[in-house]
Each structure stands twice: as C-alpha cells, then as structure tokens.
Image (cartoon, rainbow, N blue to C red):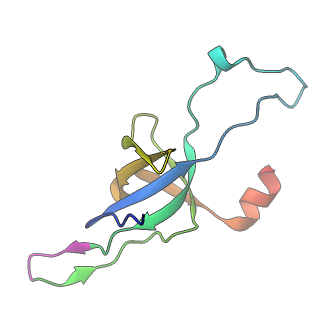
Amino acid sequence: MTFRPLHDRVLVRRIEADTKTKGGIIIPDTAKEKPQEGEIIAVGQGVRAEDGTLHPLDVKAGDRVLFGKWSGTEVKIEGEDLLIMKESDILGVIEAEAAAKAA
C-alpha cells in the first residue's frame, strides 16, 4: 500500500532517541519522552494560492526534521506508527552535517 498526503501535509516517521545519556546512565521507558525528531516519508503536492498557483513544500522525502511536542496526528500504516502533520508544524530541517556530528 502506498500513502500520499494531501495538500501541505507530510508523513513522518519518528526517530527514536538514545536510551543512554552521554554519561552512561540508562533511561527507563517510563521516563522517556516521545522524540521530536523524525524523517519525512512522503509529502503532499503543496498549497494552492488564491490565484490558483501551486506552491510546493520546502521539505522533501528523506529530510530529517524537528517538530513540536504535540504536532501531528498519529496513524498506523502497515503496522508502523507514523505521524501526519502540516508543513507549518515542522520547526526546521536538520542538515546532514549537523546530523553526522550529533550521532
């Protein structure tokens, strides 16, 4: 099954946070917060302006993004928990160089 979001919506897979701190302390599941970082799986075509022109989204499939804690709607597609959110809920894109340094 394929899923294509409509208009200015994107489909996001959460990227799980580390289970250990830098100091080596293991974080139990009950103390973990849901990650606010994810990878874009699919994007809609964009938003239509009042004059009918189509404005494409700034993000694309494969981008790593940060989003708000309460952003999006949780859905299950093919047994996988994903988020559908509007592009405006995305706070920013994580560039590849910054992601490599963080890992």
In the picture as drawn, the residue positioned furthest to the left comes out as: 50
- Count the labels in the image: 0
Above/below status of 30 relative to 1:
above
Left or right, residue 92 beside residue 3: right
Q: Residue at x 75, y 35 (%)?
A: 18
Left or right, residue 10 beside residue 36: left
Closer to us: 36 or 43: 43
In the picture as drawn, the residue positioned furthest to the right comes out as: 24
Res. 42 image quadrant: bottom left
Closer to us: 43 or 36: 43
Q: Residue at x 25, y 67 (%)?
A: 7
Res. 70 image quadrant: top left
**Residue 27 image point, x, y percent:** 76, 20
Above/below status of 53 relative to 8:
below
Q: Which residues are magenta?
A: 47-51
Left or right, residue 60 beside residue 17: left
Above/below status of 16 relative to 11:
above
Above/below status of 15 relative to 58:
above
Residue 48 painted magenta: yes
Q: Main secondary structure of the magenta part?
A: loop
Residue 75 painted magenta: no
Give the position of the N terminus as an image quadrant.
bottom left
**Residue 61 image point, x, y percent:** 52, 69
Res. 51 image quadrant: bottom left
Q: Residue at x 43, y 57 (%)?
A: 11
**Residue 38 image point, x, y percent:** 57, 51
Closer to us: 55 or 34: 34
